[in-house]
Amino acid sequence: MKTIDSWGLVLYNRPFREEDKLVKIMTEKAGKRMFFVKHASRSKVKSVIQPLILAEFMLKIADEGLSYIDDYREVKVFQNINEDIFKLAYATYLVSLADAAISDQVYDPSLFSFLVKTLELMEEGLDYEVLTLIFEVQILDRFGVQLNFHECCFCHRVGLPFDFSHKFSGLLCPQHYHEDERRSHLDPNVPYLLDRFQSIQFEDIKTISLKPDMKIKLRHFIDQIYEDYVGLHLKSKKFIDDMDKWAHVMDKGKAGSLENSD
Ligand SMILES: [Zn+2]
């Protein structure tokens, strides 16, 4: 058992036996692991084992089996995310996606900082739907999926109105559209934006602003990519999909009532 100090993001906790809890934390220095908290409701760490808590933990790491939280220093709470059901749903999805993307105990500080930074931007008020799309695109390679949204997979030309081919798992330029009669017929802005998202830096994310219909097109395409190449079915994603449908109905209701009052 070794003792380390590390920043960590709480992914979730669940009851264990009568009074104890198991807490899954993605740590910066030791990957994600399950931590055992004895008598959780009386523990000195009880306030820092809630999902989405970011803290500098003092941890006892076991090579096998459960690890322990000794104590903590600094704590950051994502207040705005926690107070907004939509943001919270998207943040919860990102966290479960990151959890699914790597095995336990795998050292991946870049995934940790990418997840934390994305949550910080969501907390700051940046568009959570766009942040989620960028996160989903950039995390694809953790699932072993490497898609090139930059060039035609036949002639390697760039900067053209591309379409996506599932048959070739790549882009087709107008000259090569005919290679796949079942090509996706995408709005060319979809692959263009995905290409940007793949390599975007955090400071540039603030400059991105997308219209609702473009976000919907990206959403549909990314969903299809995840369905075909990743095959994950996360409960948190289903929740977002249902919530978006519901929000859409509410919007329609609002528009309808406006029309009636006119
Ligand atoms: Zn081509």
Image (tube, grey):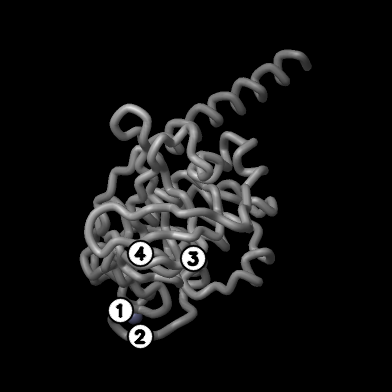
Please say if the residues under marks 1 and 3 sit with CB atoms less than 8 Å apart.
no
Q: Which residue is mark 4?
A: 140
Mark closer to the observer (1, 3): 3
Q: CA distance from mark 2 to mark 3?
A: 44 Å
Q: Residues within 10 Å of mark 2 (few under 14, many from 20)?
A: few
User: Residue 156's x, y, as percent?
Assistant: 35, 85
User: Residue 160's x, y, as percent?
Assistant: 46, 77
Mark closer to the observer (1, 4): 4
Of all residues, the one furthest to the top in this rendering is 261
User: Along the polypeptide, which appears first: circle 3 or circle 4?
Assistant: 3
User: Residue 226's x, y, as percent?
Assistant: 32, 54
User: Along the polypeptide, which appears first: circle 2 or circle 3?
Assistant: 3
User: Along the polypeptide, which appears first: circle 1 or circle 4?
Assistant: 4
Mark 4 secondary-structure assignment: helix
Q: Residue at x 60, y 39 (%)?
A: 82
Q: The disc labelled 2 sits on which kind of residue?
A: His
Q: Which residue is mark 3?
A: 6
Please say if the residues under marks 1 and 2 sit with CB atoms less than 8 Å apart.
yes
Q: Determine whether the beta carbon of the residue marked 1 sits less than 8 angstroms from the nearest atom of ligand 1.
A: yes
Q: Is residue 126 left or right of residue 115?
A: right
Please say if the residues under marks 1 and 4 sit with CB atoms less than 8 Å apart.
no
User: Residue 68's x, y, as percent?
Assistant: 38, 53
Q: The disc labelled 4 sits on which kind of residue?
A: Leu
Q: Determine whether the beta carbon of the residue marked 3 sits less than 8 angstroms from the nearest atom of ligand 1.
A: no
Q: Which residue is mark 2?
A: 156
Answer whether residue 214 is visible to the viewer in this image: no
Q: Is residue 21 left or right of residue 89?
A: left
Q: Which residue is mark 1?
A: 153
Q: Is residue 231 above or below residue 82?
A: below
Q: Residue at x 49, y 65 (%)?
A: 6
